Image (cartoon, coloured by chain):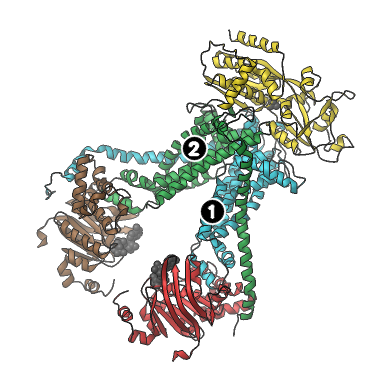
Chain colours: A cyan, B green, C brown, D red, E yellow
Amino acid sequence: MVSSKKNHDELSVKERIAKNKQSNSSTMFVEKLVPKLLLLCATLSVLVTLGILYTLLSETFTFFNQVSVVEFFTTTYWNPWRDSYGILSLISGTLLITITAMIIAIPLGVASAIFLSEYASDKVRRMLKPILEVLAGIPTVVYGFFALTFVTPMLDKIIPDLSFFNALSAGIVVGVMIVPMVASLTEDAMGAVPNTLREGAMALGSTRLETTIKVVIPAALSGIVASFALAMSRAIGETMIVAIAAGATPKFTLDPTQSIQTMTGYIVQVSTGDVSFGSTIYYSIYAVGTTLFVFTLIMNLLAQYISRRFREEY
Amino acid sequence: MALVNKETVSNKMNSRILKNKIAKVIFFIATIIGLLFLGALAYRILTQGLGSLDMDFLTGFTSQSPDRAGIKAGVIGSLWLMSVTAPVTLVIGVATAIYLEEYAKRGKFTRFIQINLQNLAGVPSIVFGLLGLTIFVYIFKTGEIILAGGLTLGLLVLPVIVVAAQESIRSVPNELREASYGMGATKWQTVRRIVLPAAIPGILTGGILALSRAIGETAPLLLVGAATAIFTLPSSIFDPYTAMPIQIYSWTKAPQPEFEYVASAGIIVLLVILLLLNSIAVFIRNKFSKRL
Amino acid sequence: MADTKSSVFNVKDLNLWYGDNQALYDINMDIKENDVTAIIGPSGCGKSTYVKTLNRMVETVPVVKTSGEIEYRGKNIFEKNYLVEDLRTKVGMVFQKPNPFPKSIYENIVYGPKIHGIKDKKTLDQIVEKSLKGAALWDEVKDRLHENAYGLSGGQQQRVCIARCLAIEPDVILMDEPTSALDPISTLKVEELIQELKKDYSIVIVTHNMQQAARISDKTAFFLSGELVEYTDTNTLFQNPSDKRTEDYITGRFG
Amino acid sequence: MADTKSSVFNVKDLNLWYGDNQALYDINMDIKENDVTAIIGPSGCGKSTYVKTLNRMVETVPVVKTSGEIEYRGKNIFEKNYLVEDLRTKVGMVFQKPNPFPKSIYENIVYGPKIHGIKDKKTLDQIVEKSLKGAALWDEVKDRLHENAYGLSGGQQQRVCIARCLAIEPDVILMDEPTSALDPISTLKVEELIQELKKDYSIVIVTHNMQQAARISDKTAFFLSGELVEYTDTNTLFQNPSDKRTEDYITGRFG
Amino acid sequence: ACGSSEGEDEDTSNGDTQSETDGGEALSGNVKQAGSSTVYPMALYIQERYASKESDVNVTLQSIGSGGGFEKSTKGEIDLSNASRPIKEEEKKKAEENDVNLHELTLAYDGLTVAVSSENDFVDNLTVDQLKKIFLDSSDAKKWSDINPEWPDETIKIFAPGHDSGTFDYFNEVILEDNAMREDGDVQTSEDDNTLVRGIKNSEYAIGFFGYAYYLQNEDSLKALGIQNGEDAEPVKPNHDTIQSGEYAPLSRPLFTYVVESALEKPQVYDYTIYTLENAGDAAKEVGYVALPEEKYQEQIDKVKELAGK
Ligand SMILES: Nc1ncnc2c1ncn2[C@@H]1O[C@H](COP(=O)(O)OP(=O)(O)OP(=O)(O)O)[C@@H](O)[C@H]1O
Ligand SMILES: Nc1ncnc2c1ncn2[C@@H]1O[C@H](COP(=O)(O)OP(=O)(O)OP(=O)(O)O)[C@@H](O)[C@H]1O
Ligand SMILES: [Mg+2]
Ligand SMILES: [Mg+2]
Ligand SMILES: O=P([O-])([O-])[O-]
């Protein structure tokens, strides 16, 4: 019933298209195939996760056939070469680094975010922010080298008892490294607070400081706290800085001037020395890896939970 | 009845304003501390490293002697690694992003993939090293070759690219898709001819940033076995290799103290390359961001 | 008089929901060949939803559900094996906000022919000229066909979109407030163009501007809260509406 | 008659620029004590800009530059050592979109008193009651003072904002289209409230609704493209405008 | 490129460019070498030189400790495994299980050096017994004053090679007589000798041990201790002569590389092995170890040729 229309032109695009349509089953084939290929790629990320879980868990399982789980998680002496696997000392080392790092990163990060988001003019912000972000892009091996050859000698002048390899120096540098992360996530959270709230506060005669502390930060709190959790996860997983500057002496201590070892540091130490495939020590790096993975996963999930659960509607 | 005592209010005014001023200075100083640290780092590395940084350093292999050591193998090795990492992650990452943004129904499965990606982004790089070690070196017995290192880094930065590509695809205005569908275009035609070209600058920017992350990674490569000393350049992805950060790390461990300067020179090269990559990313972003 | 023309669309008992919200209620409407059919009504009454249903563009919103039938040239477009791509090739659409692709003018026009498999350079050149002439834009842009379409003014961009639509020689053109983002002069040009296009195409146009509807359309449909209140000759509707609500609306009592 | 009242604001030759765009031109205007002064004019004419200049809130936009003087109670607010915080404590403001803090109603009201150093629980309680009563909201919310203000309706939220403003006992209250986001009933309530507040406060209100201006204000200023076209008694302005443009605007010929 | 050409200059000046064993045809392929960090500087020196001769052969070198090297070589994963101690019985057994034959080659002599920071002004010499007291797990001496009452009342910080290290094994064997070494919070172990050097350098009350080469490179900041082998013996400090003569006892030791015999079938591995022996003397001198007598190298070359059937 398609009445032939009035375009009696030299080229009837319409007819051509209709003809192409009939012969073109390949377009439809592609149309069906593409989503499947894309889905396959999307599934890969899940496969990677499964791969991680599989490698970690299967070797960890073997490890716990040789070493008691209870001993692993409750004792504090770590010396695999003497069959002593008390991961608490590695965990305490990791925590020491993380705490030190957070003591640096939270105040500096939040203060920078406040300055950039509430005080700085557009021009200053546009200038400072990228520079600050450079800090996040510096390879960790560079930081490690800097911690060992610059920060430690400096600290040594202030703290005479400082051990050459120590948690303090590494922790400080890890902290500086994650400042941009805290700063930019906090700034994002503060940026999401609508300007009308600021105006409301300022119109009551608030100073910038009062507006920030009493209105903006409470309103952005969930985002800010989530950024802390993410930053902690990052500090827990940091490897090169601690491997280079924090030492390799597993120790159950909370004294940051001491040489310690973190979970990541242990994995590097063993795997770059020698992974004698199949020995208990070999499996131990997976057990430590799993513990590390669980720690960071908890922090990440916590961050997501906080920002979802406590998301403010303005 | 005035409940608000005007007197108290105006008495307090000055101290409040002073507090605000002091706070501003404190916040400024806190911001600057990060920059000062960066400055100290740059100064230290430059003063230590510039002396060793010359043509010979750029074109030479490592050496037992600090005067002769060069970073060529590291630079070339890193480039080779990227030749594996870049295409693999770009293709898979962009495909994943297209799937999530354009095809997936907003259901449980999509949310699952999304959350999974978020968490994957937070997995410590050394755990990816363990993954690479187990999968490539032990299970597939690839040996310690570029392919294994490149794929490991690829998996590591995959979430970064996916997120960047997703954002970029999301920012393509819906009107363009509608226009294309309105012409009778199929979904894939629309994605390929309209959405992707419009999203490409954002994807590239994200991709470059992800690559610069990959280039600086050390820990996973230590695990999958980059060589510390090598005097030949790889000729295929099945060859052994070293990479810039590995080379730098090995110099920080060399016996002679002079290697500290060599390491600094290596760091300069690495940082310059990263800076270049980032400038390209910024350039792309600025060049194309005006368009849409 | 118009009833002797053959129907392009036969809409029968059309209902449409966005999730749980019903946006269209029991629409019945015949759209005739070579008519300009105007759709008017207050904001949110379902005008856009309705025209987007005619080429099933509304389905890009995932939560949409429909019931009823729309026959295009006698075939129900909601039937399972009806190819939407095919429908949309024949039923072109122009949108409220000009939405050229971020490509050159030339690339914008040949986009449709290309995806439909026309690759011959000469044919494409001819199509570009013909479509731009059809959209009354040829003289203004013929020297800068390879410049980005974003460099054009809003009115020119809208005409590029119309030309892009003409390039695949559709049967019907749907227009959703095509002039609402344009200045008065561009609006005039597009209105003149619609009068011109009417000779070759059937046109359905959504407009919030009653003067425009009165000026350019043959038939007008008045929608209110998702219902089709009145649908008749434009003159009749504006001069002698049979429904009180129509009268209230066209006399400006609400909307 | 009103000229015997003393002035709150004396605006002299005020010019204001956003970057290079001038938004206000040579404004001269006296605002009297205990008057309701309405500011009307078409969208974009500078109404919001103008009232925000009166408490220097406009300076939160970094590119703003001004020239001229605004004297508040005889002192030029642009003077170097003039404390904006002080000015804003005395010149309160209510915004177009209700913007309560995401805190309890109680916390919203005591925010101002607290930052100004009032800590005594009993005084604060009294302030809350008084302010909410002043904002005609006390009866509606007295049983849920510690619930989040976001749980209230739009109209109630706006009255919370007014109460918040009253809590620090300002001298002047600026209102920028305080009812434009509200439904008719809430609007009525706020209008009644303004009539009430007038006894104790000087009020400057921006509105796009001329009926509203006519209903509630003593004096009206008509702005057009950044200029103050006419400023006189409300009755005079609406019934006997002296400027052609004012007449055109109030009779609906544009805007 | 400059680095290698300099290497070539030295080559010609030393006049030992003779190893055109394979008829001058350019070689290619991989040679994988891993193991002792003590041998590492020597191996690196040789590898660097070799690269300018056979630029198509891919030699890789990893410093993972003697134990780490054996771990790989006994499985045939690498071609050459460097070691600062002889192969252990259990490693031999493992190699047999995997059908791998390892052939021992001696490259140089090393004096395992016990060092303190140059800031340390109270110790110069230690007896073997004192070493035991410091390093033995069973000893309860934790402070310097526990060793000698005149020394400061400060904790002894120990920097020792890790468990995969041949140096550790050797020290453990000859000084501690295979009793366990201390490993607690004051002991930092690392496969990476430079970590040890750095650690000792920077703390006045630290002590540690590693290969002589690592000491020599850091002579300014370290102090090598004289070792009294017995209560009445004279303290002997490590240096070229005392190591060569064996007077520096009991800590003088040979350094090895173990070649996987079957790998010698690969021409590039064979060529590299020969080259290593030909240049080991120079390498030892260059990095601070003591070369073997020339004929010792020649004997080993002949043996390798025989093994490879040439
Ligand atoms: N994507 C969507 N999802 C959910 N509801 C929608 C969506 N688009 C439109 N609606 C709803 O459907 C109803 C009709 O909307 P529609 O856009 O068709 O109105 P309209 O007449 O075109 O209005 P306007 O003149 O403002 O363009 C409205 O109530 C609207 O809220
Ligand atoms: N933050 C700003 N930056 C730059 N220009 C601005 C800004 N705010 C307003 N303007 C400009 O200043 C002029 C006056 O704007 P203003 O918001 O004061 O108008 P208005 O009369 O309040 O309009 P409306 O009735 O729409 O609220 C306008 O041309 C506007 O574009
Ligand atoms: Mg619409
Ligand atoms: Mg306004
Ligand atoms: O690295 P080592 O020489 O101590 O095995």
* Percent of width and height locating residue C11: 20, 57
Quadrant for the N terminus of chain C, please.
Answer: bottom left
Label 2, secondary structure: give it. Answer: helix
User: Would you say B135 lies left or right of E131 here?
Assistant: left
Q: Is residue D87 above or below residue C2?
A: below
Residue nearer the viewer, B109 or D185: D185
User: Would you say A115 lies left or right of E283 here?
Assistant: left
* Percent of width and height locating residue A304: 53, 52
Q: Identity of the amino acid at label 2?
A: Gly
Label 1, secondary structure: give it. Answer: helix
Residue A129 disc label:
1
Residue nearer the viewer, A248 or A156: A156
Quadrant for the C terminus of chain C, please.
Answer: bottom left
Say which of marks 2 and 1 sits in front. 1
Residue nearer the viewer, E185 or A75: E185
Q: Are the residues under marks 2 and 1 on the same chain? A: no
Residue at (83, 38) in percent of width and height: E143
Looking at the rendering, the quadrant in which ligand 3 lies is: bottom left
The residue labelled by disc 2 is B154
Residue C62 disc label:
none
* Percent of width and height locating residue D186: 42, 76
Residue nearer the viewer, E214 or E8: E8
What is the chain letter for disc 1?
A
The alpha-carbon separation of the residues under discs 2 and 1 comes to: 28 Å
* Percent of width and height locating residue B210: 49, 42
Q: Is residue B130 visible?
A: no
